[in-house]
Amino acid sequence: MFKTQWALLEHELSLFAKEREEFEREIKKQQYKSKLENEKTIYKANGRINAGMYFLGVHDELSLKKRYRDLLKLFHPDSMNGDVDAMQAINSEYAKLKKKYEEM
């Protein structure tokens, strides 16, 4: 009797742990989506894309490449929240800055 109750309790606890992990993953997913939307709002103020804001704080070619990779993850059209207009602005600004840092 005790063993069956114990087994039932262990089973229920394992189900609870799985549900909790799924819930925490869902929360993280929602937080990530919210962060993406906030990023888009910042970079797309007044319906216009301000390409200069994408690379604020970049002072060398290495940090430029890192920022570009991060922005690709956020705005690439093949990603879940991709934005073609933003990617075009990012690519244009990246090309300008890359040329500037290569000339230095």
Image: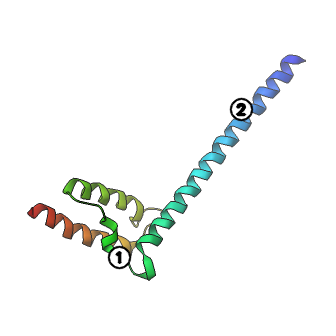
Residue 32, image x, y percentages? 52, 56
* Quadrant assignment, res 51: bottom left
Side (left or right) of 69 relative to 103: right
In front: label 2 or label 1: 1
Q: Is residue 13 above or below residue 41?
A: above
- Assess whether mark 1 and mark 2 are in contact (beta carbons under 8 angstroms): no
Residue sitting at 20 percent across and 67 percent down? 97
Side (left or right) of 94 relative to 77: left
Residue 39, image x, y percentages? 45, 66
Instruction: Residue type at mark 1: give it.
Output: Asn
Residue holding disc 1: 50
Residue sitting at 42 percent across and 75 percent down? 44
Residue 81 in view in this figure: no
Q: Nearer the viewer, residue 5 or 44?
A: 44
Side (left or right) of 76 relative to 41: left
C-alpha separation, residue under disc 2 versus residue under disc 1: 49 Å
* Quadrant assignment, res 102: bottom left
Q: In the rendered structure, which disc, 2 or 1, sits on the residue that comes first in sequence?
A: 2
Instruction: Residue type at mark 2: give it.
Output: Ser
Total numbered circles: 2
Residue holding disc 2: 14
